[in-house]
Image (cartoon, rainbow, N blue to C red):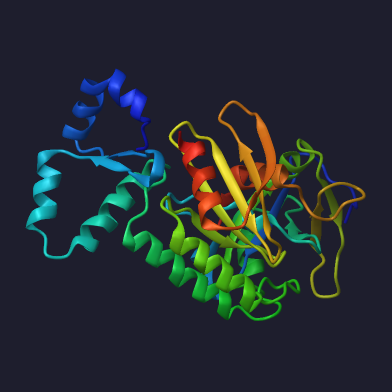
Amino acid sequence: MDKTFKSDEKLYRAVYPPELVAMYWKRDGSLSSAAFADPKGLSVDRGNYRSDDEVASDMSKRFTGRIIRLYVKNCTDIGAKVKYLPSSNNKYHSEIHGSEETVLLSKQQRLFLSHKAAVVL
Amino acid sequence: MIAKQMDIRANIKKYFDMAYSGDVIFVPRKGNKNVVIISEDEYNKITRSDIFSTYATSVISHASAKRERAVSTGSLKTDNLKKLEVIHDLKDGWNGNGAPAFSKSLIVKAGEIIKGLSIQPEIFPTALGSIQLEYDNSRHDHMEIEIGDGSEAEVFISTYDGKEFFGTVSANSDDINRKAIEFYG
C-alpha cells in the first residue's frame, strides 16, 4: 500500500471505550473533541478507497464501538499529519498526529476534527 | 435557549412570544440568581407534575436539541455525577491505546466542581487522564475546560466567527462558574 495519502482518502476510527459507546456523544448528537485526544497518536484505519460498508464490516471484526469517518483533507487542512503505520494484525493501521514533530493533536485540531467526523456505524 | 438579561429587556415581546411558543429561556444573572422564562402552559405542567425531575429532564432535552446549554438542574448535575462514576471505573488501557485509569484525587476534585456548578457542562474523559467540561452557547461559541491533577484548569474557547482563546482558570467551582457565566453573558 502506498505510504502517502491523497486528500480524498477516508480515515476511520473506532471510538472507545466500546462498552460505553455513548461516552463521547453529546446530548445534541454531536461528538466531543475529547474523543480525539491521544498522546500516543490517534489510531485510525485508512480507507484505501474501500466502501464505508466494507471498512465498517472489517473493523467490526476487531472493534465493538462506534466507527466514525474523516477525510485526509480534514487533517491536512489544520496542519495535522497522517502517518501510515501498518501493524502485524492490521495492514490499514495509521495514526493522525498533531504535526510531523508532535503526536498529540492540539485543542483546535481536536475540535475541528470532531466537527468533521461522520458516523459510519 | 440562553439569553442575556439586557437582551430580554430590549426585546421582551420577542422573548415572551418565544416562551409562549414553547421555548425555555434561561437568563443567567450575577450571583447565580438565574431565572427561567416559560409559558403558562409549561408552568402548569410543572405545577401539575408530582415528579419535577421528569419535567426538568424534558426541559434539558429540549434545550440541548438546539445545541444550547441549560442552567443547572438537579437531573443534569446528577447525570454528570453518574458519568463521573463510570469514568472512575475505567481501567488502564480503556481507550484501546494504553490510556491510564483516572486518579481517585481527580475524580473527587471533578465531583466537587460539578456539585458546585450553577451552569452544568457536559463532561468527557480524555486519554490524557483529564476530565473535559464542555459548554456551547446559542451563538455557537464553544468552551472547553480541562481539569487535570493540577490546581489550574486549561480553558479553550472557539467562537462562532473563528476566534480562539486560551487561558487557565483555578480548578474550583467558583472560578469555573464565573467563567461559564462570562461565556454565556
Report the residue at 73% width, 50% height from top. A49
Q: Is residue A25 visible?
A: no
Image height of A29 relative to B142, above or below: below
Quadrant that contains the C terminus of chain B = top left
Quadrant that contains the N terminus of chain B = top left
Q: Is residue A6 left or right of residue B123?
A: right
Residue B68 x %, y %: 41, 42
Q: Which residue reaches farthest front?
A: B31
Report the residue at 48% width, 69% height from top. B83
Residue B110 x %, y %: 56, 66
Total residue callouts: 0
B145, B54: nearer the viewer:
B145
Image height of B45 relative to B183, above or below: below
B174, B135: nearer the viewer:
B174
Query: Could you say which quadrant of the image residue B153 lies in?
Result: bottom right
Q: Which residue reaches farthest top?
A: B10
Residue A115 x %, y %: 59, 43
